[in-house]
Image (cartoon, rainbow, N blue to C red):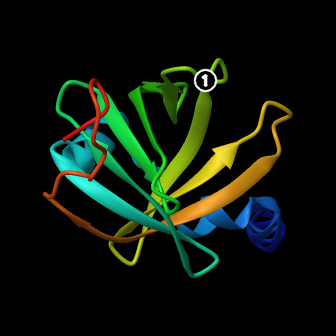
């Protein structure tokens, strides 16, 4: 009986998605603690993708690698970090976790499929260079 139970547990764990088995999901509190008042710089497939400045109020400022900036807000919803950006009707949600001390975020598509995964390259307390009214510094 013990062998059957062990086999069932191993089978269930093997069926779990790799990200679930390998890395914990970041809670709303942990995510806020890690990012509030910080700017996190992200890569995708090893290349710089963009940076997000997280304000303590839940406001966010995203800057693409191209220099285009978008102001928005973030909140936790159903275990995901979700962003709403000014001028963009689509809300974007991400499943987040920590790997080797760095945040990773996998986009959750409306279809339920995984989208791209961004990985933190580093974070700091700098302001993003996003000139203009209501956009940033």
Q: Nearer the viewer, residue 52 or 32?
A: 52
Residue 102, percent from left and from top? 37, 69
Front residue of 49/114: it is 49
> What is the quadrant of the N terminus in the image?
bottom right
Question: Going 83% across and 45% down the picture, which residue do you hit?
Answer: 113
Q: Which residue is mark 1?
A: 88
Residue 26 rendering spot, x and y as whole percentages:
41, 48
Q: Residues within 10 Å of mark 1 (few under 14, many from 20)?
A: few
Residue at point 28%, 26% (across, down): 58
Residues 87 and 106: in front is: 87
Disc 1 is placed on an element classified as loop
> Number of labelled discs?
1
Give the residue at the far bottom of this rendering.
Answer: 46
Q: Position of residue 101 (x, y in %)?
A: 32, 72
Residue 126 is left or right of residue 4, and the answer is left
Q: Is 114 left, or right, of 127 in this rendering?
A: right
Give x and y (percent) for residue 24.
47, 58
Up/down of 96 relative to 21, above or below: above
The residue at 78%/69% (across/down) is: 14
Residue extending farthest to the front is 132
Q: Nearer the viewer, residue 48 or 114?
A: 48
Q: Quadrant of residue 9?
A: bottom right
Q: Can you say which quadrant of the picture contains the C terminus?
A: top left
């Amino acid at each position: 009986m013990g062998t059957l139970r062990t086999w069932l547990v191993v089978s269930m764990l093997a069926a779990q998605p790799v990200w679930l088995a390998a890395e914990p999901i970041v809670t709303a509190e942990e995510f806020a603690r890690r990012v509030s008042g910080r700017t996190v710089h992200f890569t995708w497939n090893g290349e710089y993708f963009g940076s997000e400045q997280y304000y303590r109020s839940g406001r966010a400022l995203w800057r693409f690698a191209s220099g285009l900036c978008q102001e928005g807000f973030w909140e936790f919803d159903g275990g995901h970090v979700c962003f709403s950006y000014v001028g963009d009707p689509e809300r974007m949600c991400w499943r987040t976790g920590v790997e080797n001390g760095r945040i990773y975020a996998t986009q959750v598509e409306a279809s339920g499929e995984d989208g791209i995964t961004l990985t933190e390259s580093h974070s700091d307390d700098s302001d993003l260079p996003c000139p203009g009214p209501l956009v940033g510094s």
